[in-house]
Image: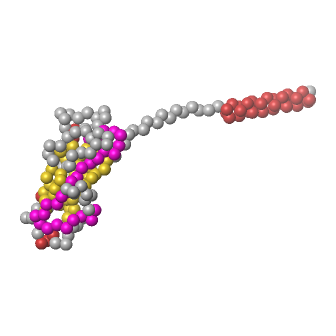
Amino acid sequence: MGKIKIKLFVVSLVAAMMTFISTSTLAYYSTVGKATNVVTSGNIRFVIHETTDQGKEFPKEGVYIVPGDIVSKKVSIESDCEHPFYLRVKMVYGIDSQELSSEECFKLNIDEEHWVLHDGWYYYTDIVDPGETTPDVFSHVEIVGSKVDNSHLGKTLTLTVKAQAVQSENNPISDGNVYTASGWPKEAEK
């Protein structure tokens, strides 16, 4: 009887090992399926052009001014992507890194036929198509003589043009007002 118990023990041990080996084999060959669907949205890119009346690039170092000067500075925006978009621009005025209001030093001749002011931004009234360049937002900057006085001597006046765009595809607007489009970035709190 002792031999039968040993044989049964060996058979049971072999059966247990076969179960373990077959379980390992099943685990090794089984896989978990996972589908990953990648959706890539288009991106919007544009270039802000600043030129003079002569068609030359506006000097990066700026220009020297005196009160009453009218400086030639044409600002337009060119689409550099394959998607149409809505566009807005904002002018930020400053003196030696301190922000000013526009009335303090500058007067711009805004193209009000193509650009409309809403909440401090000028919105282009049409869609900017791929490869298209907008009409100039403005073409001249007048240095307001009555506002620029001797206290401004040696200081740097700045006019910074900021632009933002949102897709126009599947983004309807209300009553033809571009500023009603969805997705305009919120302005940072000061």
Residue 101 image-quadrant placement: bottom left
Residue 99 image-quadrant placement: bottom left
* Left or right, residue 79 beside residue 178: right
> Residue 109: x, y in percent?
13, 52
Q: Which residue occupies 24% across, 64% down?
A: 62
Question: With respect to residue 84, does 54 lie above or below?
Answer: below
Residue found at the far front of this picture: 54
Q: Which of 80/9 is in front?
A: 80
Q: Which residues are magenta?
A: 60-86
Q: Which of 127/190 is in front?
A: 127
> Residue 159: x, y in percent?
21, 59
**Residue 82 included in the magenta stretch of the image:** yes
Question: With respect to residue 168, does 144 lie above or below?
Answer: below
Please say whether residue 184 is visible from this viewpoint: no
Q: Which residue occupies 18% across, 45% down?
A: 115
Q: Which of 85/186 is in front?
A: 85
> Residue 102: x, y in percent?
15, 57
Quarter of the image with the C terminus is: bottom left
Please say whether residue 128 is visible from this viewpoint: yes
Q: Which residue occupies 91% across, 30% down?
A: 2
